Image: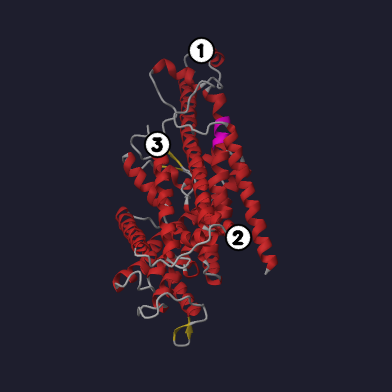
Amino acid sequence: MAGGITETGEPYSAFVGLVYMFNLIVGTGALTMPKAFATAGWVVSLALISFLGFMSYMTTTFVIEAMAAANAQLRWKRREQEEIDDSDSNSEYSDDDVMGRGRSEPETKPILSVQRSGGHVDHFDIVERVEMGQMASMFFNKVGVNMFYICIIVYLYGDLAIYAAAVPISLMEVACGNHSCSAGSVKYNDTDPCWGSVTRKDAYRVFLSVFTLLLGPFTFFNAQKTKYLQILTSLMRWIAFTMMIILALIRIGKGTGEGHPPVASLSGVPNLFGVCVYSFMCQHSLPSLVTPISEKKHVGTLVLADYTLILGFYVLLSFTAIFCFDSTLLHDMYTLNFTDNCNVLDIPFLRYFLGLFPVFTISTNFPIIAVTLRNNWKTLFHRDGGTYPWVVDRIVFPLITLVPPIAVAFCTHNLESLVGITGSYAGTGIQYIIPALLVYYGRRHLEPVMGRDAINKHRSPFRHTFWVWFVVLWAVFCLMFVTANIILTDTKK
């Protein structure tokens, strides 16, 4: 859930934090990146993904600074409450003393001047896990808080639609694809037969129905991903990614690669933008990742190292893909290129493993995201002191969570477009606009309380206000560019 202060969780080292962040960022988006690279051209793709990686790193440092500011504000409010309690307990002795104390220690007195007398306390230590929704409540007005929840709800809907389409696509390709090694790579159409008179599109919808019936009910309950399940899915993911990179490199090294991607194709840029934004998404989960790190002194270096590694990984995965496979034959889900091309991989078990691995990893995430979305809906409409009727709480909220993404997945299984649109719109809000506004208003809230001399040890390297407005303007420009491209593309059809 995006809101609320939660427990810190079991502490872990900075290195483990680096691994967790890597696993969080590198997910389904990475599998749609090769086709986006092939469509936009390799030079344009390299330049854009490098710039977007830098922008995502900047806003990640904004969120970490805002987390530290939120922790400082919570400490200040706690101290203020303690002073009120002390005043109440001393009032029975002397009303004059209380009046004197009120005159000498006004509420707006900077917190640092009070605490200096009693040992060193770093108010910007990140010790409480303050989720983005709680930070929005602390630093935004009511309209801003509602806009935050609407943005994250739209993003989670996109997430669920992507997951709901990705699993049936993988099952359809494995069930209906070519596994005989006799025909090599083939580009299939939705109307091609799968089993007798059953077309591939019909098979996709059958698998989507089964997926909904099996995983949909979890939306009505609480689901939690266990530590061992997380380890298993992470292991499967890295085995699959490593296999794909090595197999593509071997084919390219033998000189049998079929890829001849264009240098630049501007028509593919808007979709590549959305895919890249989606693939660098982690800002909404940073409180859960950063807070448990036991030694946060070098957390800034940790984040920079992570983004450098992830950028290198994305470039390696995508470049090996676009030079190994013919661009016209690249699937929306990159793993599927290894299931029907025996020139690349001729071991049946491994071909099935790569084809089905998204099914296992995505299926474990779907209930978690669904429950998170359901809880955000509840938070958006919650009023202090109010409770929901049983029917609304247990039936209505789960249904409005589950039905829209499944309906979208029934209408389209174009994963590249789903990822692109989700990243371009809701992703832009979560990755750019919300972090920039959180750090801006967080600084404004704390200055009169903490004093101008207070130094946030977790402050972003991009501390000048120029960077905040640069991010906001960049986000607005991107939204306008993507929207204009969609309109112009539809007009030409």
**Disc 3 versus disc 1: nearer the observer:** 3
State yes or no: discs 2 and 1 in contact (Cβ < 8 Å). no
- Residue at numbered disc 2: 267
First-in-chain label (2 vs 1): 1
First-in-chain label (3 vs 1): 1
Whether residue 84 is visible: yes
- Cα–Cα gap, marks 2 and 1: 74 Å
Q: Residues within 10 Å of mark 1 (few under 14, many from 20)?
A: few
Q: Is residue 55 above or below residue 377?
A: above
- Cα–Cα gap, marks 3 and 2: 36 Å
- Spot the residue most to the bottom: 196
Residue 125 within the segment the image draws in magenta: no
**Residue 201: percent from left, percent from top:** 50, 77
First-in-chain label (3 vs 2): 2
Q: Residues within 10 Å of mark 3 (few under 14, many from 20)?
A: few
**Label 1 element class:** helix
Q: Amino acid at mark 3?
A: Thr
**Disc 3 versus disc 2: nearer the observer:** 2
Q: Is residue 117 above or below residue 380?
A: above
**Residue under the image location 68 percent in, 61 percent down:** 487
Q: Is residue 433 above or below residue 229?
A: above
- Residue at numbered disc 1: 97
Q: Amino acid at mark 1?
A: Asp
**Disc 2 versus disc 1: nearer the observer:** 2
**Residue 100: percent from left, percent from top:** 54, 12
- Residue at numbered disc 3: 301
- Spot the residue most to the right: 491
**Label 2 element class:** helix
The quadrant the C terminus occupies is bottom right
* The magenta segment: 439-444
Q: Amino acid at mark 2?
A: Ser
Pick the residue in front: 26 or 150: 26
